[in-house]
Structures are given as structure tokens and as C-alpha cells.
Amino acid sequence: MITFLSVIEDARKRGVAVGHFNIGNLEQLKAFAHAGIKLNVPVAIGVSEGERAYLGVHHVADLVRSYNTEHAKPAGFRLFLNADHTHSLDKVREAAEAGFDEVLFDGGKLPMAENIAQTKEAVRIAKAINPNIVVEGELGYIGSASEVRKELPAGAAISGEDLTKPEDAKAFVEATGIDMLAPAVGNIHGMFANAPDPALDIARIKAIQTAVGVPLVLHGGSGNTDADFMAAIGAGIAMIHISTELRVAWRKELENSLRAHPDEVAPSKIMPSVVDEVERVALARLRLFNKL
């Protein structure tokens, strides 16, 4: 049986990272699936609580299963579904019962003791439903929205003193029993309008990886440099989240398509170029993360 954790561990052994892309509609899912199929690599599909409410928890799970039924390879392409940024234990249970491969319980804004207590309970709930589900925890606040920013989000851990400390990460992983950890290492959700994101703290990533042992996840990857991505993978990052830059591509090409077809009302004629553009951006990220 191919599990998501086995795929993550294999990526870590090979010195690559799984690309994680959030979806808000069918066109985005098509684009990411097509990119994964073309390169024959696994792709993680994320849906936050808001995206799940919009798409429907069971509907999105059925769509991902349909792609795997038709296109998955024993070693290569497969979609894995993540209940991204889940803030309540009820939503953890809902995702596990719907057959998600992963759930991220996000207690990053909570005091550490409360984050530990709630994340530990999230692990207990999810694993009781599906022992193979991957449970990810978040330690350190890096903002909460995929958007184009003019300034840092209030309270985001961006300076050395506020970033996740290796000793705290070790205590957090041991106390909660999570399978993967998303630390604050200079990354933020969203991306800046006219500048790259602040540099990642690669030395801290390596120290955290040494301390915790479990795979590390980089959230808020939009806006970071290719060099930082490669260094982060080398230091222990096994999955990278990209959302905002893909949403920007979707929005820009949708506007272009609507201008090019001012009288068109059929989505099947308006949307193909949008799918193609989002796929183009996703392909570039997957090639980079998988060293292709």
C-alpha cells in the first residue's frame, strides 16, 4: 500500500520535495494533476477549511480519487489530499472520515502548551479513524492568508528571536506524536507585490531537522527564491507549499481570457488557457522541487 508518509520519506531520502498546491476550483485541480502526470511525480493537493467549505469535503475527495483511479502510477504520479490549516478538532475528524491522506492541525498562533494539547488530540482523533493518515503540526506563526502583500502580517515570526527553536520543535514533536512539522523559519504566507520574500533561515531548518527527525514542511513558499528552495530541501524540507503565486497566475490569465473573448459565456471556451497557465507555473515548481 502506498501511503503519503512513505512518499514523503522517499522524497526526503532522494533529496527532493513534494510540491503542495492549494485548490479553490476544478480548473486548478486539473492544472496540478496534469502537471504531475506529465512529470510522473506525486503532488499534494491542499484544501483549507474555507476551500473545503466552498468545494465540499466529500466532493473534493471524490475528484482526487477519480484522478488516482485513472492516472496513478505505482511509483510516480499520484495525488494526495491534505486538509490544510485545520483549526478545529471537529474538522480534523471530518477530513479523516472523508478519506483525506493528511490533515494539518494549525495551532501556530496558540501558546505552546495549548498548541501541544490540541495537536496531540488531533493526532489521537485522526489516527483512530485511519492509522495511515499523516498528521502535521505547526509551530510558529507565519501569517494566515494566501495573498499579495504590501507588508508583513501582524505578529508573524520573521526575526531570529521569534522563529521556531530546535529545542521547542523537539519537545513539540515528542509530546504530540505528529508525523510532520511545519516550523517558522523565515517563511510567510502570501507573497510581496514587488519584492522577494525574506531569506529563509537554512541553518535553522537544518538544526530543527536534526532535533526532530520527522519530515519538515515549508509553508508560504510563494515569493521565495529558487536558491532558497534548493538549500531548504538540502537542509531537511520534504514538502513545499505554493499557493499565492498560482492564484496570481489563475487570476491574471482569467482576466486575459475574458478580455480576449468579450462575448463568450461558455466556461469550456474561456477556461482552457487559464488551466494551461496555472499548469505552466506548477510544472516549473515541480521540476525545481524534484530536480528534473
Image (spheres, grey):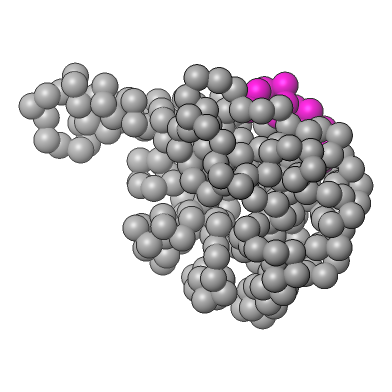
Assess whether residue 225 is covered by the magenta stretch: yes
Could you tell me if residue 111 is visible in this image?
Answer: yes
Q: Is residue 62 above or below residue 190?
A: below
Where is residue 179 shown, x and y percent of the image? Answer: 75, 61
Q: Is residue 237 above or below residue 66?
A: above
Taking the image as shown, residue 86 lies to the left or right of residue 212, namely: left
Q: Is residue 69 magenta?
A: no
Which quadrant is the N terminus positioned in? bottom right
Q: Nearer the viewer, residue 219 or 236?
A: 219
Residue at point 79%, 43% (across, down) = 161
Q: Is residue 137 left or right of residue 286?
A: right
Residue 219 in picture, x, y percent from top left? 63, 43
Residue 142 appears at what percent x and percent y? 62, 45
Q: Residue pushed farthest left?
A: 263
Q: Quadrant of residue 103?
A: bottom right
Q: Quadrant of residue 54?
A: bottom left
* Residue at left offset 78%, top offset 33%: 201
User: Which residue does the image show at 44% across and 46% down from the upper left?
Assistant: 23
Magenta stretch, residue numbers: 224-238
Question: Where is residue 170, by image quadrant?
Answer: bottom right
Is residue 100 found left or right of 264 in the rendered image? Answer: right
Task: State the image coordinates of residue 99 (x, y, percent, origin top left).
Answer: 53, 68
Residue 62 seen anywhere in this rendered image of the structure: no
Helix, strand or loop: magenta stretch: helix
